[in-house]
Image (cartoon, rainbow, N blue to C red):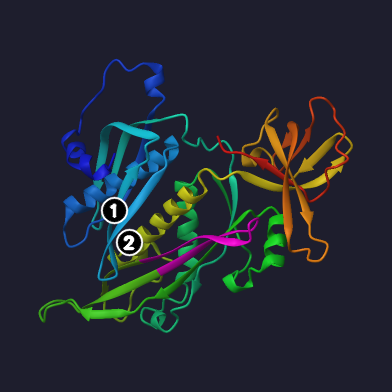
Amino acid sequence: MKLKIIKGAILAAVGCLSLGLNTAALANWYEATGQAAIERGDLNSARRAAIEDALQRASLFAGARLQSQQQVIQGIMQHSQITLSSAAELKEVQLLSEVQSKNQVTITLKAHIVAEGKACRGQYRIPLLVSDVQLQARQDAIIGQLFQLGSDSSKQLQRHLRDYAPALVIEPAPQIIPLQMLDQASADALFARGHQFVLLASINDLSLGRPLHKFWQSAQHERFFAFELWLYDTFERRVRYQQEYRTGSYWPSAESTPGSHSMAFWQMPYGQKIDQVLRTAAQDISQQLQCQPLLTQIRQVRQQQIQIALGTNHGLKVGDQIQIIQLQRDPQDAQIRRLLHSPLQLLLTEVTPDGAWAASPSQQLLNHIQTGDIVSLAAN
């Protein structure tokens, strides 16, 4: 169901209440809050964007998979359109509140979303290492002294990832990881340390465009923003997802403008447009990882038991079933691996926040399993 079809119905349904809902139906109601910038006094467009933002949040928590389609005009992202997958159905939407400030509108709603059994429920949480955003457009950053925008955008992106992607365990990288440094050896080292996926990003354009003001108005210029990200799979040693996002808004030509560390910057129309890009990026990453199996290396083998470095922080619990994948390396080239799926089924017997032990229910010996072999926990 395409959400743009129901936007008008949503606005007309403010105050609508459903009576006689049973317990099962109540379990499918999700409350969420969305925000959007009010540009040039266009409250209706901002309200629709805020509703769409809130519906995206509700859908993610409902376990529905989303497809985002951005409309781009002359390289500028204008708005996005979201489609719920066939595994979910949006039954009803109730608007609970609307708050307007000078530059933005905030919408809180409840959505009745029914996700079929095929949808991923997010039982396990995937570890994601997030590298600081690289500021490639340093020459452009002179205007407004935005040299900290890479680091500050990283913080915003991580907030949105925690908001939109509850099925991820977010860990900031201690330093920037350049994409060209992710060769097979470094990918294997990252995977061995528990980092199944790495998120890299860069800001490629902060340039000014044409003047937007009339001669009697305060000086303003169009300003662009280009943001590119890469989602790197350390187990498969490849970039799994790559996307560039472009947007823009007006920029005041005054000598003093807020720094990117401040709330004042993110409440500017230009800052809000950047934040919209970061929210969209977080949603796209959540989609990419929503149904991925959780993988990790075996840390220790002790007769009938194996130890892994995943635990309750990643959604594991006693009794969960795990799959073993044995690794065979080519004797001529250790970088070449062969994966053998073992028929052996193990159950978790002991789980701590960051670790777990597993054993065969029949107490079968695990002599053929080695440290460095892979454990897989499939998404539901």
Mark 1 and mark 2: span between their CA atoms? Answer: 8 Å
Quadrant of the rendering where the N terminus is positioned: top left
Q: Tell me if I can see residue 373 in this picture.
A: yes
Q: Quadrant of residue 208?
A: bottom left
Which contiguous range is marked in magenta?
227-245
Which residue is disc 2 drawn over?
272
Q: Magenta segment: does it hold 106?
A: no
The answer to whether residue 288 is left or right of residue 352 is left
Residue 127 badge: none
Which residue is located at x 85 percent, y 37 percent? 366
**Residue 237 within the segment the image draws in magenta:** yes
Residue 156 falls left or right of residue 42? right
* Residue type marked 1: Ala
Residue 313 in picture, x, y percent from top left: 64, 41
Q: Position of residue 261 (x, y in %)?
A: 44, 67
Towards the viewer: 280 or 353: 280
Question: Residue type at mark 2?
Answer: Gln
